[in-house]
């Protein structure tokens, strides 16, 4: 199954940078060297078994935008699963950006009325005024420009986990059997007496599903049924709390992904392939192991009487359900 994802927005708003971070695992510092995208750059990313993301990074210079909205209109906007529209938080041309956005939205609703729309207020790290106030202002502005179309807005930056969080949510909505995955993870969690079980995509380490579905991904907010409900800004940070069964760290997925990706990278530097990991901490144990060809699973257990060998066995037994 192929899902077309349009990545649009003004030139320099940060589209190619986020693609480079999320899908090629490049560091944020390397994005300063990126040149402007000429026309559309297409990428195919095999995500889960048979789910392929067909990512269209649409260069944002005016001449290209004008062409997407005229001669290339049907090619660009048909068969779209998701449109991600990126706004530079510090843009000096918000009116122009909104005008292009409205035109793109009109084309999208004409050619792909079922497509989900995500808006990213990006480069939040550059915002000087209180970030939440500024985000709220932008959110209202883009909501107004969207009319009756259901949208989900995130505040993001390549310099913290907000970008990863937003993309996890977006990708989560593209997974056709997400509810089934949640159910299976719940069964694994019960079998392992686990506090939580998390499924990660193999290359990007984006969170695909978790056993604690209701409290986990902000994706639940994106499946909104009313135009007025937009997800809360992921940019505003909650105070850190220890990882325990009752009060889990709000950024635990993002931090875990970051650490594992760094570890995988270190392994590749010494030409060692990364397969699995066991963490034995003071008050919990975590086992990370391959689930399928495209996923890793992490099982977090707070019960010291549970052996990691038993967790691994449960993972092995569960594999068939996830393939
Ligand atoms: P076009 O290809 O012309 O459409 O531009 P683009 O939207 O792909 O922009 P690109 O990704 O090339 O980024 C432009 C610049 O923004 C680069 O110098 C990035 O380093 C910078 N940038 C991207 N994301 C962020 C961010 O979150 N914060 C800050 N401060 N800079 C960012």
Image (tube, helix red, strand yellow):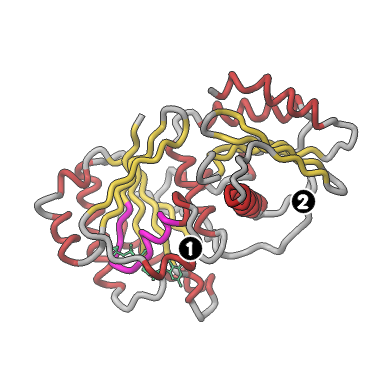
* Extreme residue toward the front, this view: 271
Label 1: state its secondary structure. Answer: strand
**Residue at 80%, 25% in the rendered image:** 310
Task: Answer with left or right where residue 163 lies relative to residue 71.
Answer: right
- From this viewpoint, is residue 115 visible? no
Position of residue 3 measured from the top left corner of the image (x, y, whole percent): 34, 37
Task: Answer with left or right where residue 290 lies relative to residue 14.
Answer: right
Q: Residue 243: give its label.
A: 2
Q: Circles 1 and 2: CB distance less than 8 Å?
A: no
Say whether residue 14 is magenta: yes
Is 213 drawn above or below residue 228 in the view shown? Answer: above
Residue range in magenta is: 7-20
Q: Residue 155: give its label.
A: 1
**Ligand 1 quadrant in view:** bottom left
* Extreme residue toward the bottom, this view: 128
Towards the viewer: 108 or 291: 291
């Amino acid at each position: 199954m192929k899902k077309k994802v349009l990545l649009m927005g003004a030139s320099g708003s940060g589209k190619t940078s986020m693609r480079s971070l999320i899908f090629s695992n490049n560091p944020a510092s390397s994005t300063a060297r990126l040149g402007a995208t000429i026309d559309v750059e297409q990428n195919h990313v095999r995500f889960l078994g048979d789910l392929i993301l067909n990512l269209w990074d649409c260069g944002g210079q005016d001449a290209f935008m004008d062409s997407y909205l005229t001669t290339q209109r049907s090619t660009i906007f048909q068969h779209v699963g998701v449109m991600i529209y990126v706004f530079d938080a510090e843009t000096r041309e918000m009116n122009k950006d909104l005008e292009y956005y409205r035109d793109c939205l009109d084309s999208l609703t004409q050619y792909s009325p079922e497509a989900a729309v995500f808006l990213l207020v990006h480069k939040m790290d550059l915002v000087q005024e209180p970030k939440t106030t500024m985000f709220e202002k932008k959110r209202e502005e883009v909501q107004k420009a969207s009319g009756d179309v259901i949208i989900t807005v995130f505040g993001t930056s390549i310099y913290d986990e907000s970008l990863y969080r937003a993309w996890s949510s977006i990708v989560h909505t593209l997974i056709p059997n997400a509810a089934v995955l949640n159910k299976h993870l719940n069964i694994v969690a019960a079998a392992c007496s686990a506090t939580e079980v998390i499924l990660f995509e193999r290359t990007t380490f984006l969170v695909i599903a978790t056993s604690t579905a209701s409290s986990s991904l902000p994706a639940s907010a994106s499946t909104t049924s009313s135009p007025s409900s937009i997800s809360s800004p992921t940019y505003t940070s909650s105070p850190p709390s220890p990882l325990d069964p009752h009060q889990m760290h709000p950024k635990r997925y993002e931090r875990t992904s970051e650490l594992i990706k760094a570890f995988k990278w270190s392994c590749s530097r010494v030409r060692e392939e990364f397969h699995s990991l066991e963490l034995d901490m003071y008050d919990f144990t975590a086992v990370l192991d391959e689930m399928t060809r495209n996923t890793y699973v992490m099982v977090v257990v707070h019960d010291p009487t549970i052996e990691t060998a038993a967790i691994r066995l449960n993972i092995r037994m569960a594999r068939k359900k996830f393939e």
